[in-house]
Image (cartoon, coloured by chain):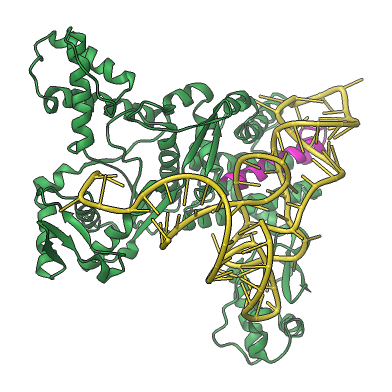
Chain colours: A green, B yellow
Amino acid sequence: MKQYLAGRLTASLKALGLGGGITPTFEKPRSTAHGDLTTNIAMVAAKQAGTNPRQFAQQIVEKLQIDATLVDRVEIAGPGFINFHFTDKFFRERLREILLKKNEFGRLDAGHRRKTQVEFVSANPTGPLTVGHGRGAVFGDTVARLLEWTNYDVTREYYFNNAGRQMRILGDSVRLRYLELIGEKIEFPEDYYQGEYIKEIAQHLRDQFADALRSEPAEGKFKQQAEQEIFDDIKKTLRRLGIAHDVYYNENTLYETGKVKEVIEEFRKRELAYDLDGAIWFKATIFGGDKDKVIVKSTGEPTYRLPDIAYHREKLRRGFDLVIDVLGADHVATYPDVLAGLKALDYDPSKIKVLIHQFVTIVQNGEVVKMSTRKANYVTLDELIDEVGVDVVRYFFLMRSIGSHLNFDLGLAKEQSEQNPVYYLQYAHARIASIIRHAESQGIDRNAFHDLSLLSQPEELSLMKLLTQFPDMVESCAATFEPHRLAEYLHDVAGGFHKFYHAHRVVTEDRNLTAARMALCIGVKTVLSNGFSILGIQAPEKM
RNA sequence: GCGCCCUUAGCUCAACUGGAUAGAGCAUCAGACUUCGGAUCUGAGGGUUGGGGGUUCGACUCCCUCAGGGCGCACCA
């Protein structure tokens, strides 16, 4: 439709002797009184035309030739908007399209199978996932779903490090707990992992080995067991949320295969690295960094940014055209170094999109809970899911933009779980399912011939208009990586349906009208269920 | 001190990326169909979009500045 109108407008401009270089853009007006689509072209191009916007709009509209079965009114309003009001027939055709495409409605080919990677979660296996991780996990997965829906070839990846200092401390924490269990006197350092799960892991080792590990080093069996149990636990939690990664990428492989060393060598070759005070520095300032950065410490150990650069280079080498990193706000400072490093190696950093989500603040009993894995001061994702369920968790994390600091009041979440916004959406779906069941029990065939021209009530028309927007919505949410707008849109669809439901009966004596309204209901159910699948929430037939 | 994010109704947040009269949910108050699910619907009150300046036909949105909050600013990850 936009394409069609753009063509007509261009023709009109040409007729005024003005064609060149002006491409009309459209948007959906906020208020329905302003039509179904609007263009600001007269305001944008008025100067070039040498008149004022309203007059110019008038001239354009006079020259405009448009199919009257699609658009029944064109008007000029406000400072010079040209508003198009579509015909009811147009919307009925769109409803027919929904009924035809079913669970494919809204799919589009924005991605052209572009090879895309979404890296998210990427928490090191030092403890269970917390509510804080939940936001990144659900968001990353939903971005992946959006991209899949718009025909990107998506790989979900989890990057982890099982070799760092924190992992050593983890191993040693388990070791001390184990020694404690076999009766030795220990002193447990304050900055070690305090969580109960450490004791559980130690218990498992004790069950298996009795006291045979008395002189085992921390980095041996202890670390190994901890990593495995914690990772299993993390994966289980993710699976509950409907999240499964395709690739788990171990930072260590970057060392084993020499990729890290390679980066240093190439930096040196390009004279982008130098030695100072026994450390190796990367000239990040050349690429817009605030200062040069250490990539290898004087101890010979690399800093985190070196493998990070190597890792992202591998992403691009692996053929990804689009790489999405989902990070928490605490990592804002790290990615400019990575991008600078890639630029230094002649890779195109614009292929990498870094999506940063702000923190989740947990409020419990009116107090802010400071989360720390090490101090075991956290609410785990599992506990949250137990409490409110998967759909509420997913929807809660998705309904707000990632730029906002999220307040999560645990008490409120529990109390309100029965009146959580997600139920509003699911209720609409279940309600439609129920209507269909009722209709069929009355001997009405859901596939019966339906004359959609019988749908002419305001509630019916505005509902159809809403449904029509779904593909555009999906496209723009995928393009901007903003699932929260889809959540809001689906809320509107559900609301539109509830209003319709209260204003009109679906199943009546009038067979034709019943068939038409059934068709509308099925259209709503289709859009809801397609949208739910992108958000990763259930579309219940009953509640 | 520097960088990034945030500040919108009593509370939690939107605003189609610069558009027309800034919208939802919760909370408060007042109401609704004896037939399809009341986890619903209708209505009311509530705003100088943190303050100030600028850019332009037009600003919650962009720029400058001030204030408040969050996160960073290592030879930690």
Question: Residue at left 40%, top 31%?
Answer: A130
Residue A492 included in the magenta stretch of the image: yes
Apparent side of residue A37 relative to residue B67 in the rendered image (left or right)? right
In this rendered view, identify the residue nearer to me: A129 or A81: A129
Question: Residue at left 57%, top 78%?
Answer: A23
Image quadrant in which you'd find residue A62 = bottom right
x%, y% of residue A126?
A: 28, 31
The quarter of the rendered structure image containing the C terminus of chain A is top right
Question: Residue at left 25%, top 65%?
Answer: A284
Image quadrant in which you'd find residue A414 = top right
The answer to whether residue A418 is visible is yes
Question: Residue at left 51%, top 25%?
Answer: A389
In this rendered view, identify the residue nearer to me: A286 or A109: A286
A302 vs A528: above or below: below
The answer to whether residue A504 is visible is no
Boundaries of the magenta span: A487-514
x%, y% of residue A187?
A: 22, 18
x%, y% of residue A83?
A: 73, 69
A198 vs A332: above or below: above
Apparent side of residue A130 relative to residue A79 in the rendered image (left or right)? left
A190 vs B41: above or below: above
The quarter of the rendered structure image containing the N terminus of chain A is bottom right
x%, y% of residue A145?
A: 43, 45
Residue A309 included in the magenta stretch of the image: no
In this rendered view, identify the residue nearer to me: A29 or A314: A314
Magenta: main secondary structure equals helix
- How many numbered callouts? 0
